[in-house]
Image (cartoon, grey):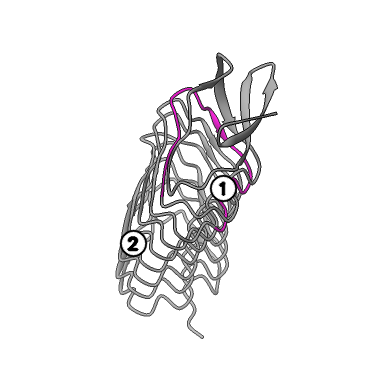
């Protein structure tokens, strides 16, 4: 089914955008089609899109796997307050994306969702969130600082790996685990304060963080032998 610039399908929950077939560089996704609310951006719907700006409408609750993946010209995305889930690789390799504000209703961000967003400088996380996938912000070389959401239980494996400009991270008091290679090669990071609830710092979690000189670790935290290793 197609109308105007979008291929879409009807589901019991509303409209899923399946593919963008237009040519505009600035895209406003409609909040309804055929009088039915748009509730989901489907898998790879904007894959390798030439758009520079995209506005996702209120009412959308889910952004599917690879929905905006490999869209190298995309610099700005506006996400709705209704959004709850960002699936794996949703914005993977959006190399020109400079900032993202993740709405407070989002409770899950999938693996590699923003991996290789090489120009990403500013990220606003939800005030509360529990589930963050692996490698979500890996190889975001321009990212300089981030405040992680309260409620987060784990910084998963390779979450910020090779974020060479990352100099400040605020970890929430709810955190229980820092995964393997979570901050590997964060070469600008100078200080990290580990919350008291953290039980484990994983293998190579801070490997090759050459400038890291101020580390506060609670007495009860287990630290893998190579967590702070240098190659």
| Drawn side of residue 119 relative to residue 21, left or right | left
Q: Where is residue 44 in the image (x, y as percent from the top left)?
A: 64, 46
SS under mark 2: strand
Q: Residue furthest bottom?
A: 231
Q: Name the residue under label 1.
A: 90
Residues packed near mark 1 inside 10 Å, few (<14), some (14 to 19) or many (20 plus): many
Q: In which quarter of the image is residue 10?
A: top right
Q: Earlier in the sequence, mark 1 or mark 2?
A: 1
Prevailing secondary structure of the magenta residues: loop
- Identify the image quadrant of the N terminus: top right
Magenta segment includes 54 = yes
User: Is residue 24 visible to us here?
Assistant: yes
Above/below status of 16 relative to 161 = above
Q: Where is residue 22 in the image (x, y as percent from the top left)?
A: 54, 43
Q: Name the residue under label 2.
A: 192
Give the residue drawn at x 56%, y 25%: 39
Q: What is the magenta range?
A: 53-70
| Drawn side of residue 220 relative to residue 40, left or right | left
Above/below status of 225 relative to 102 = below
User: Is residue 169 visible to us here?
Assistant: no
């Amino acid at each position: 089914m197609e109308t105007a610039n979008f291929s879409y399908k009807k589901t019991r929950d509303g409209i899923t955008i399946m593919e963008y077939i237009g040519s505009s560089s600035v895209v406003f996704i409609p909040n309804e089609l055929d009088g039915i609310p748009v509730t989901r951006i489907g898998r790879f719907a904007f894959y390798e899109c030439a758009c520079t700006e995209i506005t996702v409408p209120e009412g959308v609750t889910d952004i599917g796997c690879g929905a905006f993946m490999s869209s190298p010209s995309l610099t700005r995305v506006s996400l709705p307050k209704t959004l709850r889930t960002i699936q794996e690789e949703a914005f993977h390799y959006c190399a020109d994306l400079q900032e993202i504000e993740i709405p407070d209703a989002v409770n899950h961000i999938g693996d590699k969702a923003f991996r290789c967003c090489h120009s990403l400088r500013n990220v606003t996380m939800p005030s509360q969130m529990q589930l963050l996938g692996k490698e979500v912000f890996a190889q975001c070389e321009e990212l300089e600082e981030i405040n992680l959401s309260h409620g987060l239980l784990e910084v998963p494996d390779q979450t910020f790996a090779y974020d060479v400009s990352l100099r400040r991270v605020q970890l929430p008091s709810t955190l229980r685990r820092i995964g393997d290679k979570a901050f590997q090669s964060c070469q600008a990071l100078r200080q990290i304060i580990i919350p008291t609830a953290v039980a484990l710092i994983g293998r190579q979690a801070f490997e090759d963080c050459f400038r890291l000189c101020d580390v506060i670790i609670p007495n009860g935290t287990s630290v893998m032998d190579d967590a702070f290793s240098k190659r």
